[in-house]
């Protein structure tokens, strides 16, 4: 069974600074995928970044990047130059190929960006 | 617009009642997933349908049921509602492009049971 753990219920950062959100996961599968989703106050689920486990290179999307440590089963999200609009809940999620492909989510980290 | 349509957006109903939530997946996506998000909680997987067939079940109560129709839209039926069923219910659809999975979420249905 897949499990995803986010150990930081809440975090805060000053505008323009960098923050890292932690995520660890457990899976016995080889072909798996990891995601970070953002949920702003509107409650819409927005994909931030995706990482395929077979790729060694860490994924990057503009100010968002991940540190994927496969052996440690760690998948942290780094947000650079934080902006007020980054204030949201952030969920780490995983899925794997060959099963139902459902996403399994962590409990989330509430990030507040302060002016 | 994400391409996944959920209706209604808001629903207020009394305990003991039955409601139906509707989801239309993104065009071409065969899989539909239902998730429940209670206050300040993560997303709990309820059930998945793939091309009309049930594919996976999560922590879905016996009072809840779902189905996917030939046109691929899906409905989640919640009956004998309790106060604790108040939550945001998300539908998502997915596609595999040969390299990775892409999931698209609807905007959710906020259910309030009073």
Image (cartoon, coloured by chain):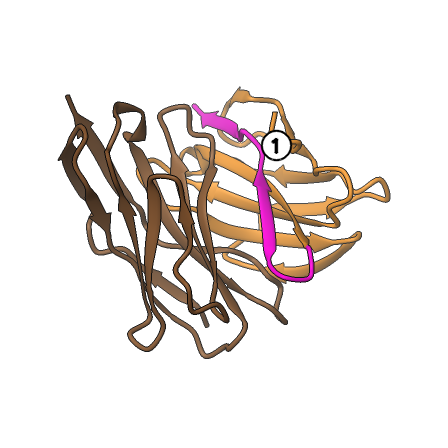
Q: Can residue B61 be seen? A: no
Image quadrant where residue A37 sits? top left
Q: At which x and y percent is residue B54?
A: 71, 58
Q: Quadrant of the C terminus of chain B?
A: top left
Q: At which x and y percent is residue A85?
A: 31, 25
Q: At which x and y percent is residue B82?
A: 46, 36
Q: Quadrant of the N terminus of chain B?
A: top right
Q: Secondary structure at mark 1?
A: loop
Whether residue A73 appears in magenta in the rendering, the answer is no
Which of the pair A72/A25 is nearer the observer? A72
Task: Check the residue under mark 1 and report the chain it is in.
Answer: B
- Left or right for A94, reference B57: left
- Residue lying at 49% horizontally and 27% vertically, measured from the top left: B110
* Image vertical order of residue B78 relative to residue B45, above or below: above
- Residue lying at 61% horizontally and 32% vertically, measured from the top left: B18
- How many circles with numbers are drawn on the protein? 1
Which chain is tinted brown?
A
Which of the pair A111/B61 is nearer the observer? A111
Which chain is tinted orange?
B
Which of the pair A65/B8 is nearer the observer? A65
* Residue stretch in magenta: B97-114
- Residue lying at 66% horizontally and 31% vertically, measured from the top left: B3
> Mark 1 highlights which residue?
B18
């Amino acid at each position: 069974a897949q499990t995803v753990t986010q150990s930081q219920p809440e975090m805060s950062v000053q505008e323009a600074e960098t923050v890292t959100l932690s995520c660890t996961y457990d899976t016995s599968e080889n072909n798996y995928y990891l995601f970070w989703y953002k949920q702003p106050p509107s409650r819409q689920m927005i994909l931030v970044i995706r990482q395929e486990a077979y790729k060694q290179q860490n994924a990057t999307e503009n100010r968002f990047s991940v540190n994927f440590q496969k052996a440690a089963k760690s998948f942290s999200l780094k947000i650079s130059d934080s902006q007020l609009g980054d204030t949201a809940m952030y969920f780490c999620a995983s899925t794997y190929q060959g099963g139902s492909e459902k996403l399994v989510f962590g409990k989330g980290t509430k990030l507040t960006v302060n002016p | 617009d994400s391409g996944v349509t959920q209706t209604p957006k808001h629903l207020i109903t009394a305990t003991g009642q039955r409601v139906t939530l509707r989801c239309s997946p993104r065009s071409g996506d065969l899989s539909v997933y239902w998730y429940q998000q209670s206050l300040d909680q993560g997303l709990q997987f309820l059930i998945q349908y793939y091309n009309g067939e049930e594919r996976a079940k999560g922590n879905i109560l016996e009072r809840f049921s779902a189905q996917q129709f030939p046109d691929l839209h899906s409905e989640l039926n919640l009956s004998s509602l309790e106060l604790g069923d108040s939550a945001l219910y998300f539908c998502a659809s997915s596609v595999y492009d040969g390299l990775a999975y892409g999931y698209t979420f609807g905007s959710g249905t906020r259910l309030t049971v009073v």
